[in-house]
Image (cartoon, rainbow, N blue to C red):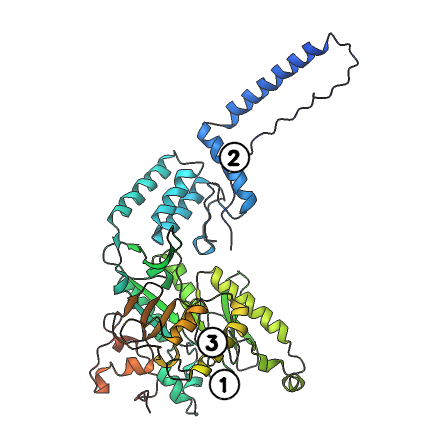
Amino acid sequence: MRKIPFFNSRSHVKRSGYSRRRQNRGGQLLPYIILVSILVVLLIIAAWLYLHNDTSEDTALSSAASASQLENPDETASGISLSPETQTDETEAPEGSLQYYLEQASLLAAGYDYDLAIQLLQMCPYASSEEATAAIAEYSTIKETLVRVDPYKVTHVFFHTLIMDTSKAFDGDSREKGYNQVMTTKDEFMKILQSMYDRGFVLVRLHDLAYEVTDEDGTVHFEEGNIMLPPGKQAFVMSQDDVCYYEYMEGDGFASRMIVGEDGRPTCEMKMDDGSVAVGSYDLVPLLDDFIEEHPDFSYRGARAVIAFTGYNGILGYRTAPSYNTEEYLAEHPGFDYEKEREEAAKVAQCLKDSGYELASHSWGHRNMGEISMENFITDTDKWENEVETLIGPCDIILFPFGSDIGDWHPYDTSSERFQYLHSKGFRYFCNVDSTRYFVQIGDDYLRQGRRNLDGYRMYYDLPESGVGGDHLSDLFDVNEVFDRSRPTPVPKMSE
């Protein structure tokens, strides 16, 4: 991905070339020679400043940018660091040109970061141009109309691995029932995105809703975020569970693993019928990226989804669990490189984070964290820390499997043993499953949010022909238009 250029007029460096002249012309001539030399140097400096610096402000800006580049080579001429998701390869303007800065500012504004867009233009070399001045005025006017989002009225939708080939997922085998219940097809996912975009939904980070702050006295507590959107826009969070590409899914119409693409963005591999491996947008992450690239105003300041892993079968399609590093497994798979698997998984995890995705625990063993014994609860949490966090880095989000939780609908009892153990391991964001539009609790030291499953089970029972008469999704999309008719129906209930 092309970086914003570092545009700079380098300050001159004064060199004292006459500081140690050989005294071979006599002591009397030396003072005059030094005086003339100083006058020549001063004239050269004055001429250089006149020709290369229009204002003292530009000189200061250039000097500051020079120092900044030493610390962060990816910063812009203004010293403003733009994250990778706000930079684009689509611009045709030459790097460092006025048009280039206008396009980058426009991209920032499309993602509702009007402050950074204004700052970029104010500090670029063309700040006084008519075009930059007009853009700054436009963004300033729009900024005044923004409305703060109520963090308690932010919905959260989630998916599992997307079905790319329904003929393989729904082929009548023993796994069809489960896929039909909890998975979403690619066609459904794309229609959901389009519908939510058309209705004014904007994707935000879970961390945008609230975050930890430290007071002057050292007290740490959660503070509500300040998401600012135009009137009529609705913030939402998205997540995806079980992004592990389990072994049992092979041959059933899913991606096989996630990789870092040639363009530096996360993408997927998928095994074809002829044994070849294709690379492309075969799951939620690259499909979401494609959609946001086409609709940058669907993402608030580069926000992406929360991506959750278990650990027992490895992550991201890589077999990273210790069970794959045994003598027995290695003997049966002589070409398998366990350390390489872990190395590649870590690279993809870092790529996801760099692209704006938030990473989360889905427990190590896909366990019901509210019902298992405390001994198993601790063991599972420790395995996650030792086997998954060592690949993806520190993690403060847990998305509970099975819609479980460590408390009822009341605010958490933060003195409870389960909360205390998860909190001690760094978890601050806790998400269960809830079919209501909004379920958000913000405590002194945590944020809790309910998630809405947009899968075959939920969609089918909102269809008129199901006979249930449910209405859980109408604020997001018309289920009649989204539901994939290639699904076997009726979709079995979760208890069946």
- Foreground residue, 454 or 1? 454
Q: Amino acid at mark 3?
A: Thr
- CA–CA distance in space, label 3 to label 1: 24 Å
The quadrant the C terminus occupies is bottom left
Q: Secondary structure at mark 2?
A: helix
What is the x, y in percent for residue 289? Answer: 42, 63
Question: Considering only vertical position in the picture, is 64 above or below 227?
Answer: above
Quick one: label 2 or label 1, which is nearer the N terminus?
2
Q: Which residue is mark 1?
A: 248
Quick one: label 3 or label 1, which is nearer the N terminus?
1
Whether tag 3 and tag 2 are in contact, CB under 8 A, the answer is no
Crowding at dot 2, Cα within 10 Å, few <14 / some 14-19 / many 20+, comes out as: some
Q: Amino acid at mark 1?
A: Tyr
What is the x, y in percent for residue 263? Answer: 53, 60
* Residue sitting at x 66%, y 79%: 335
Q: Which residue is mark 2?
A: 63
| Residue 186, visible in the rendered structure | no
Indicate which disc residue 381 carries.
3
- Foreground residue, 176 or 326? 326
| Identity of the residue furthest to the top in this view | 28
- Foreground residue, 465 or 344? 344
What is the x, y in percent for residue 227? Answer: 31, 56
* Residue sitting at x 50%, y 39%: 65
Crowding at dot 1, Cα within 10 Å, few <14 / some 14-19 / many 20+, comes out as: few
* Residue sitting at x 36%, y 68%: 238
Q: Secondary structure at mark 3?
A: helix
Identify the image quadrant of residue 301. bottom left
Quick one: label 3 or label 2, which is nearer the N terminus?
2
- Foreground residue, 252 or 333? 333
| Residue 126, visible in the rendered structure | yes
